[in-house]
Image (spheres, rainbow, N blue to C red):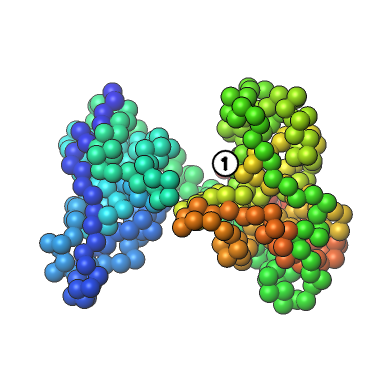
Amino acid sequence: MNIKLGDLGVINTGNTPSMKIEEFYSSNDIPFIKPDSFGDMFRLNPSCFLASVAEEKARIVEPGAILVTCIGTIGKVAITNAKIAFNQQINSISVNNNFDSEYIAYNILFNKFRLQSLSNSAVVPIINKSDFSKFEIKVEHNLEKQIKIKKWLNKVNQLKLLKEEQIRYLDLLIKSRFAELFGDPIKNEMDWIKSTLGELSSRISSGNTPKGGSNVYSDDGVMFIRSQNVWNNNLDLNDIVYISNDINDNMRETQLHYNDILITKTGRFNTENSSLGRSAIFKGESGSANINGHVYLVRLNQEIRAEFVLSILTSDVYRQLIRRVCVGGIDKRQLNKSHIEAFPIIIPPLILQDKYIQYIDQVNKLKFAIMVYN
């Protein structure tokens, strides 16, 4: 059955007691939850606390309440295991006895993208309490079945988290190997020859939106890569769209070649997984894909390896560089072509780059084995 969140129980929006009153924050009596407190498996990791004297000025919920972020990053979900307070970026749902909190939390999480579509602000995403309360989800009406589904989902989630932890460890190994071989690519303590991405490339250009926009997309033809398809070190083609061969021929300048690096052009500045400056490599057949206006292609010359450059572009220090040089409004930012051309790139010997790439290949085989066979 479909049911509105407001019909599941009591919904409240949090608030923040005045920071000017020192006694409100003088002891660690009550965990104070903000969006950065949300962890895995609906757990909370509070970094701030309130004194008990602030309880009357705070929004308090008891154990078993569902928390959902509704300002900024939309759709993080957690469940309280103690009495807590929470800020105004979060709504709580204290469900009635007909519903299992964990089952409902999973259901909200699975509808995260629908929930995000309710956002009524282009700058900082916001879902107000009224719209949140009217949001509908489909639930199993029988409580015993809810609990059975919840237990099965918990087992699946535990396995997923284990795999993700193993993958994170392998990613750290790659980062450590890069630092061991090459050092910091910005500071260049190892004094490698240094150039710019523009000087190392035969082409840097952004794509275009075909005349007619999304109306010309088709179910087959030439892949048309948009910013939502480009993630760090990965092309996600789950929602890929296609353009006709004729349109692709008219956009010849941005047809992709094997080993082109793709960099996203725009994105919100302060959101998790921002689309600003994400980078991946295209490994498909040359001419089999094109890009829209929110994606740059970078075609390197022969003196440097694409996989090595990608490791630089996706490093933590480069994320910081991108945040420094991007331009735009309070939240939505953009990388111009001149920024990308000016990106500093170290140039170690090719034999050392190849040694590093072989290491990446071996680690990626382990990652694939974890995802497939565990």
In this view, the residue in front, 230 or 205, is 205
Q: Residue at x 79, y 49 (%)?
A: 203
Give the residue displayed 57% in from the left and 49% down from the top.
266
* Residue 106 or residue 117, whichever sits in front: 117
Side of 5 where 166 appears, left or right: right
Report if residue 257 is visible in the image: yes
| Image spot of residue 74 (x, y percent) | 39, 46
- In the displayed structure, 345 sits above or below 261; it is below
Report x, y in % for residue 240: 61, 32
Compared to residue 8, the image places residue 45 above or below, namely below
Q: Mark 1 points at which residue?
A: 228
Residue 101 in sight here: no
Left or right of 200 in this view: 27: left
Quarter holding the C terminus? top right
| Three-letter code for the amino acid on which mark 1 is drawn | Gln
Check the image and report above or below for 122 versus 315: above
Q: What element carries label 1?
A: helix
Q: Position of residue 121 (x, y in %)?
A: 39, 45
Q: Position of residue 145 (x, y in %)?
A: 29, 29
